[in-house]
Image: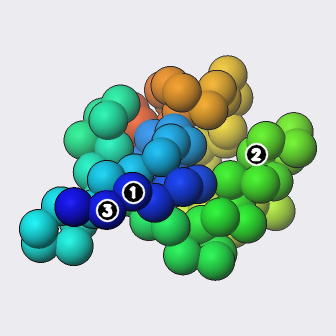
Amino acid sequence: MSLRPDCLCNDCLAGFVGIVDSNGVIACPQCGGESCDCEGCQLTLHRLRAGERDRKALGLRYPGNEVTNWTEVEGCMPLRQGAES
């Protein structure tokens, strides 16, 4: 296992230091969703930290789910709920 800084959950948008498991997967500690530490995800996380909340500007693919009440630790609950439907 290895640590990866600045991982972004693709489901809830939580940011965290990820642990890569033996299968190469980085699971989100908040929701268990798939996470990534690629350059694009790191850029999205940087933009979220800087205050960007526009879904299109962030490059998010979930239509209709705006980023509100985002925190780095908890991510974005409305986005998580929208991803389930």
**Which dot, 3 or 2, sits closer to the camera?**
3
Q: Where 33 falls versus 78 (above or below)?
A: below
Q: Where's the C terminus, which quadrant? A: top left
Which mark is in front, 2 or 1?
A: 1
Q: Is residue 85 visible?
A: no
Q: Eyeballing the image, is 23 above or below 28?
A: below
Give the alpha-carbon distance from disc 3 to disc 1, as whole Å: 4 Å
Q: What x and y, as percent, mark residue 67?
A: 67, 38
Q: Residue type at mark 1: give it.
A: Leu
Mark 2 → mark 1, Cα distance in angstroms = 21 Å
Residue 49 location, quadrant = top right
Disc 2 residue type? Answer: Leu
Front residue of this view, candidates 33 and 56: 33
Work out which quarter of the rendered image holds the N terminus and state it: bottom left
Residue 41 lies, in percent from the top left, at 60, 66
* Point 50% across, 67% down: residue: 37
Residue 27 position, x and y percent, is: 27, 51
Q: How is the image coloured?
A: rainbow
Residue at figure coordinates x 54%, y 55% from the top left: 5
Q: Amino acid at mark 3?
A: Ser
Q: Could you tell me which secondary element the residue under label 2 belongs to?
A: helix
For label 1, the crowd category at 10 Å Cα-Cα, with few meaning under 14, some 14 to 19 and many 20 or more, is few
Q: Are marks 3 and 2 in contact (CB under 8 Å)?
A: no
Question: In terms of secondary structure, where does tag 3 sit?
Answer: strand
Residue indicated by mark 2:
48
Residue, disc 1: 3
User: Which residue does the numbered mark 3 point to in the structure image?
Assistant: 2
Q: Secondary structure at mark 1?
A: strand
- Residue furthest left in the image: 22
Are dots 3 and 1 in contact, CB under 8 Å? yes
Identified at 64% across, 77% down, the residue is: 39
Q: Nearer the viewer, residue 81 or 12?
A: 12
